[in-house]
Amino acid sequence: MSTAPQDGPPPGGVLGAFGAPAGPVPLSGGQRTVWRAGDVVLKRLDVSLEELGWQEEVLTAVDGAPDVRVAPPVRSRDGELVVAGWTAWRFEPGTAPTPDGYPDVVAAGRVLHRHLAHLPRPALLDRRDHPWARADRIAWGEAAAGAVGDLPHVGALLAARDAVDGAAQVVHGDLTDNVHLHPDLPPLVLDLTGYWRPPAYASAVVVADAVVFRGADLALVDRVGEEEGPQFPQLLLRALLFRALTDQLLAPGTEWARWFGPAVSRVLTLT
């Protein structure tokens, strides 16, 4: 069966299968890969079927919580999660945070993680082998850095890495652009990306993203650090490693050290 181009909208057959109306429009921030049609959001499958099924189970269990919103996947009229390479999700209102809104993103993550604290470690984590999974393992000392460890900003972070205490649980490891805020509704958390780490690590990833890529002030490091406690500098160090390693694996020709320099210098003063 033919499918639409990667940057095109979902075809009519996909819309019909998910009960979505014609005339989908691209969502802002989705780079014309995420489309809204009525109360349904459609995007191409970007995880394994196993992980998509896990997301459905977890999000369905959290759905309806009074303090956080989630958007579980929508099954087709035939009961399928994927149709011609497309997935569908319930639309929920909200807007992405501004540079000064990341404390609210961190707070939303803490709420979500209280709802996820009982979950067992998903076995699918051991089968993931994309750049994000590889970078996560390197950042946490579960795999060797190899040649990428010779990069100055990566090497400095690796050299400052020390032990971290704290129980691991299922966490959303990509909250930064996936928490949308609404003046009258609880925060909306999208695109559950599971990792098995201490919950404060998810906060650290938000801080790393916000100060490196989203224009947030470095004061965010101190604010969230005070809230998360004495382990936070080492968690932030790992979060910076995670992002630096992922970016290097995805785009090795980019001068990433320039992007990461100020945040790396700041965290090194704390460790």
Image (tube, grey):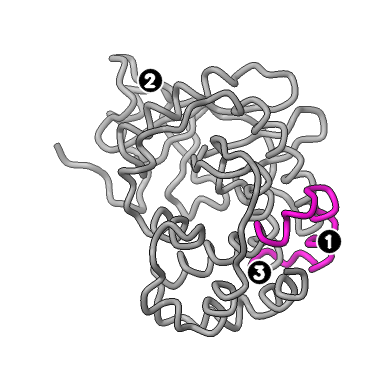
**Which residue is found at the position 68% from the left and 39% from the top?**
109
Quadrant location of the C terminus?
Answer: bottom right
Residue drawn at the location 75% of the way across and 29% of the way down: 186
Mark closer to the observer (3, 2): 3
Crowd rating for badge 1 (residues with CA inside 10 Å; few <14, some 14–19, many 20+): some
Residue topped by disc 2: 75
Secondary structure of the magenta portion, mostly? helix
| Residue that carries the numbered disc 1 in the rendered image | 222
Disc 3 secondary structure class: helix
Q: Which residue is mark 3?
A: 212
Neighbourhood count class around disc 2 (C-alpha, 10 Å): few under 14, some 14–19, many 20 upward: some
Q: Quadrant of residue 250?
A: bottom left
Q: Is residue 148 left or right of residue 127?
A: right
Amino acid marked by disc 1: Asp
Q: Amino acid at mark 2?
A: Arg
Which residue range is magenta in the image?
212-235
Per the image, label 2 sits on a secondary structure element best described as: loop
